[in-house]
Image (tube, coloured by chain):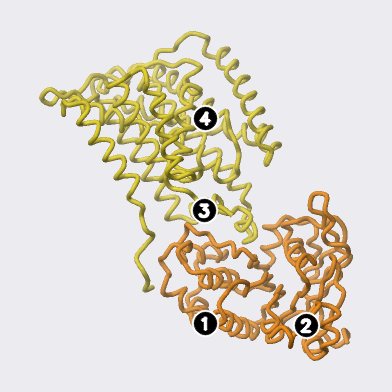
């Protein structure tokens, strides 16, 4: 099955991560195909967030290799990794509450002021970003903060966007808004690696999937195949996608 | 772009400051005395702001506890004393423009030398102890002790006089009210520094990075910016401002001792805690509050002047535990 997937933009091989005395990632092997969206699923504590943070160098891999676009990034500093064209949407959203929406986006645009056409494209699926352009980001609602966090990640074209649980704690209408936005983003060249607990979102958006358990990838393949195999879902995730809806 | 009007400003702290001032007017009784005290308080507050603003950013941006900040103030004051002495001719003339020929080099030299010392301090003393608060306290305090001994070697152990330039001595007398000329200069320089800082922090990308870094430095790094490189320059700028503040404070006191910086640190810590760590607006408001309180209480009940500022800090923290203008941190 893996032979038919596009060549990976990002690959992790035997990646271990220790946080203090805890051994979180215990040999992660994962290939993220270029283009499209790869879902990283797993139970709480499986190591999904740690995997994203390790890719970005926020936590240092203690062993293994991380290849991004042909370059080994395992030992690079976070700013150097981000500069290669990787953006990050953390679970906490990481917005700068004291800065306005405009200032958050200006800061995220590393190559000069944000491109007007790009902003218009973002405003099409996240209208509140235009409405609240001059408002301090701390005053936005939870869903709007998530929109800002995602807008910041895509304010310039990126090769890879790492997104950690974007739908967590949001109202269904906002979740659908985000799903539509990600579907739009998938039409570009951007590759997305997303951690998600919302199976509806995962099934709607995912092209490929990696399932983690106890710090390892225990399953990798096409999202559609996992979505169609209830027994596999139950074995890997402890419940089926259908039962979860 | 359409949108809701700009950031909301919290007017409660300025109103509180106004209320304290009006309350002091009732207690002092005499409006002329009150106005003299108020201008002295604003001048003192603005000088404290210049000295404290760098430290609040250093705390806020990298969680660095630099107990040697007073050293930069001291060095600035000594450098200013030497520079004014070097330009004694210009300083002694009865022309404000000629006096500026001594004052400006003194302020620039103080800021420059303190900035360079800050660069050395950050690279050699602070860098190895990032993220280790106890070691930061110990090593910066140790570094300050060593540097103070070097100051003794360079300038001697005795008090060094630092005379104000001729046209800045004395006071303007309006009716029965006397306003020291130098205090007006201190107010002007303090306001200019505050305006420049606001301009940099709000209108430049470096300023945006500093404000964002104070809130969440990890996210700034995840966006591809090297926060540590930025921090070095914030540390240098903060040290230079402390040096400038030291020069102005030395001229305010008209003498310099090796303890001039250390003696200000209690007030500086009160100011940055009252203001909210990492907040320039908070530092400004806190400094003015402390300056006004020190002068009003110094006049009404001199023995409790410092205690009153500590009480002010306690009350502010009971009201707003993160300071007057808390910086949201993640």
Subunit that carries the residue with mark 3? B
Say which residue label 2 marks: A208
Subunit that carries the residue with mark 1? A
Quadrant position of residue B145: top right
**In this rendering, do the residues under marks 3 and 4 share a single chain?**
yes
The crowding category of the residue bearing disc 1, from other C-alpha atoms within 10 Å (few below 14, some 14 to 19, many at least 20), is: some
Against B55, residue B221 (above or below) is below
Q: Locate residue B190, reporting x and y percent.
A: 35, 36
Q: Locate residue B212, reporting x and y percent.
A: 53, 55
Say which residue label 3 marks: B328
Against A238, residue B212 (above or below) is above
Subunit that carries the residue with mark 2? A
Local secondary structure at mark 4: helix
Which label lies toward us, 1 or 3?
3
- Residue at image coords 69%, 72%: A160
Residue at the top extreme, as displayed: B158
Question: Which chain did the renderer colour orange?
Answer: A
Say which residue label 1 marks: A125
Against B161, residue B218 (above or below) is below
**In this rendering, do the residues under marks 1 and 4 share a single chain?**
no
Q: Kindly identify which numbered label has been placed on residue B114.
A: 4
């Amino acid at each position: 099955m893996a032979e038919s997937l596009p060549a990976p933009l990002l690959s992790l091989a035997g990646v271990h991560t220790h946080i203090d005395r805890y051994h979180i990632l215990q040999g992660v092997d994962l290939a993220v195909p270029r283009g499209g969206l790869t879902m990283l699923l797993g139970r709480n504590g499986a190591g999904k967030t740690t995997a994203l943070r390790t890719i970005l160098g926020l936590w240092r891999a203690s062993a293994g290799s991380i290849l991004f676009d042909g370059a080994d990034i395992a030992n690079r500093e976070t700013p150097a990794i981000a500069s290669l064209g990787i953006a990050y949407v953390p679970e906490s959203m990481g917005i700068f509450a004291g800065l306005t929406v405009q200032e958050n986006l200006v800061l995220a645009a590393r190559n000069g002021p944000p491109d007007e056409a790009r902003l218009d494209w973002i405003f099409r699926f996240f209208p509140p970003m235009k409405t609240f352009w001059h408002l301090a980001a701390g005053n936005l609602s939870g869903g709007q903060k998530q929109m800002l966090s995602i807008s910041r990640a895509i304010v310039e074209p990126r090769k890879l966007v790492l997104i950690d649980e974007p739908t967590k704690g949001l109202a269904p209408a906002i979740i659908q808004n985000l799903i539509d936005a990600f579907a739009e983003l998938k039409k570009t060249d951007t590759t997305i690696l997303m951690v998600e607990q919302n199976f509806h979102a995962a099934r709607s958006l995912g092209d490929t999937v990696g399932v983690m358990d106890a710090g390892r990838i225990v399953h990798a393949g096409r999202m559609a195949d996992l979505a169609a195999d209830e027994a596999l879902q139950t074995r890997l995730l402890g419940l089926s996608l259908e039962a979860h809806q | 772009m359409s949108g809701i009007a700009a950031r909301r400003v919290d007017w409660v702290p300025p109103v509180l400051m106004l209320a304290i001032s009006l309350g002091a007017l009732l207690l002092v009784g005499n409006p002329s005395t009150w106005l003299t005290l108020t201008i002295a308080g604003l001048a003192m507050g603005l000088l404290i702001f210049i000295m404290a603003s760098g430290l609040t950013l250093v705390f806020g941006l990298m969680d660095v506890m630099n107990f040697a900040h007073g050293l930069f103030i001291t060095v600035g004051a000594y450098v200013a004393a030497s520079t004014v002495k070097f330009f004694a001719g210009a300083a002694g003339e009865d022309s404000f423009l000629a006096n500026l020929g001594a004052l400006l080099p003194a302020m620039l030299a103080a800021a420059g030398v303190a900035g360079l010392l800050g660069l050395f301090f950050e690279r050699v003393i602070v860098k190895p102890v990032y993220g280790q608060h106890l070691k930061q306290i110990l090593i910066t305090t140790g570094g300050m002790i060593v540097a103070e001994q070097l100051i003794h070697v360079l300038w001697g152990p005795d008090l060094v006089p630092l005379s104000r330039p001729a046209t800045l001595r004395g006071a303007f007398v309006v009716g029965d009210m006397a306003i020291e000329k130098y205090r007006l200069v201190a107010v002007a320089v303090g306001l200019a520094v505050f305006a420049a800082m606001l301009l940099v922090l709000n209108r430049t990308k470096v300023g945006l990075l500093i404000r964002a870094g104070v809130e969440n430095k990890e996210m700034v790094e995840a966006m591809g910016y090297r926060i540590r490189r930025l921090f070095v320059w914030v540390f240098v700028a903060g040290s230079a401002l402390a040096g400038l503040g030291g020069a102005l404070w030395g001229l305010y006191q008209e003498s310099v001792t090796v303890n001039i910086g250390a003696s200000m640190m209690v007030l500086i810590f009160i100011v940055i805690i009252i203001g909210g760590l990492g907040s320039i607006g908070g530092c400004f408001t806190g400094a003015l509050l402390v300056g006004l309180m020190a002068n009003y209480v110094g006049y009404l009940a001199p023995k409790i002047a410092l205690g009153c500022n500590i009480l002010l800090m306690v009350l502010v923290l009971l009201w707003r535990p993160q300071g007057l203008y808390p910086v949201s941190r993640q």
